[in-house]
Image: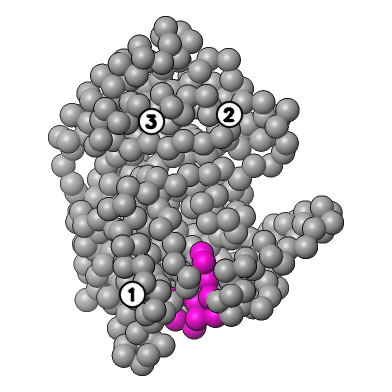
Amino acid sequence: MLKDIKLMGYRRADQSFGFRNKVIVIPSVHCANKCVEKIAMQNPECVYITHQHGCSQLDYDAEQTKKVLIGHGTNPNVYGVLIVGLGCEVVQAKEIAERIKQETPYKEVSFLVIQENGGVEKTVQKGSEIVKKMLQQASGVQKALGGWEDLVLGTECGGSDAFSGLSANPLLGAVSDFVIDCGGSVILAETTELIGAEHLLAKRAINEKVKNDVYRVIGDFEKLVLDAHADIRGANPSPGNIAGGLSSIEEKSLGCIYKAGTRPLVDVKEYAHKITQKGLTLMNTPGNDIEQLSGMVAGGCNLCIFTTGRGTPTGSAITPTIKLSSNTKTYLNMQDCIDLDAGEILDGKKSIGQKRDELLTFIQKVSEGMLTKAEENHQNDFSIWRLATTC
């Protein structure tokens, strides 16, 4: 029985479960990006991210940046963290490191400030020494047995086409239902891609508060676009979506919502907030693939399944991202990016049930250490949903 299958990973002191055991280097500000890259180049076994944020940000936007950076450090797929800052920025490296340590005191966490360490070269040298030590410690951590109840599954669709709502997304929905039935957690995101289908999701809310939150976050996003006197068409659906056969945001939304299966909606979370409930949670994110993925990972997503009709290489630096194509043509065209083909459902070769079992078996193999295509390609895509102008 698939429900009895054990998953392999890393049981943390707070009982969270990681499928990877990464050491990550994070810049608190874009001025430290190059320094972070140099530290990572000297330590190929670690991972890193870069971004364009951290300074000249209004307080609520800076807090959003902090939340996403801290969330990546506290994610259960991470063993140790090095934060690198410049020194004069709004988002300070020391604060990020302290908040990661406060939330996950069992982790190895350090920080460096370029201005206090005598420049980039000295910071790179010291940072490399810190990372080498963390990597040695991480290598000694033994894997443990876990189960489907330990999964915090992020669901995502990007580069969608007219087949996404017929094959890949319903298949992911079947997996979502399975995970929830086994006691796990599933994240549905992409708020803009629920416009027009919000009533379907609201019907599944476990109470009035959750129902009202669904209408609130989707309505607020729609109002944001209208207040900007902008036309969402062309941004969402994107030109690629339209070329793939999607005619409107409502049509895209009806396909998008299939990823969430059929189980009740238990919670609504703001962007990058921690997932705290078992079952299905809606996270308020943009439709932008990388901003959405970064938000879910910051919220604790330890594995992501990403459906695509047009094809995409996207992947997280710390969370395994399984790519699922909606059609066989895309799978064959982008085999270095796509892990599994849901086009077999369209062709009548396999049922959704058969492909569901295949995908669940694939997750088991990933938990045992098999790399996804995004991991093989060293994808470390990262982007933060910006809320305000730069000052």
Look at the image and tell me in which quarter the N terminus lies. bottom left
Percent from the top left, x then y, of residue 128?
Answer: 28, 22
- Looking at the picture, tell me which residue is in the foreground, 174 or 339: 339
Local SS, label 1: helix
Residues under numbered marks 3 and 1 in contact, where contact means CB atoms less than 8 Å apart: no
Percent from the top left, x then y, of residue 186?
Answer: 45, 62
Front label number (2 vs 1): 1
Q: How far apart are marks 3 and 1 (CA)?
A: 33 Å
56 to the left or right of 180: right
Percent from the top left, x then y, of residue 222?
Answer: 75, 61
Residue 367 visible in the current orientation: no
Residue 244 visible in the current orientation: yes
| Quadrant hosting residue 100 | top left
Q: Earlier in the sequence, mark 2 or mark 1?
A: 2
Front label number (3 vs 2): 3
Q: Which residue has dot 2 on it?
A: 54
Q: Give amino acid for label 3.
A: Glu
Look at the image and tell me in which quarter the C terminus lies. top right
Dot 3: few (<14), some (14–19), or many (≥20) neighbours within 10 Å?
A: some
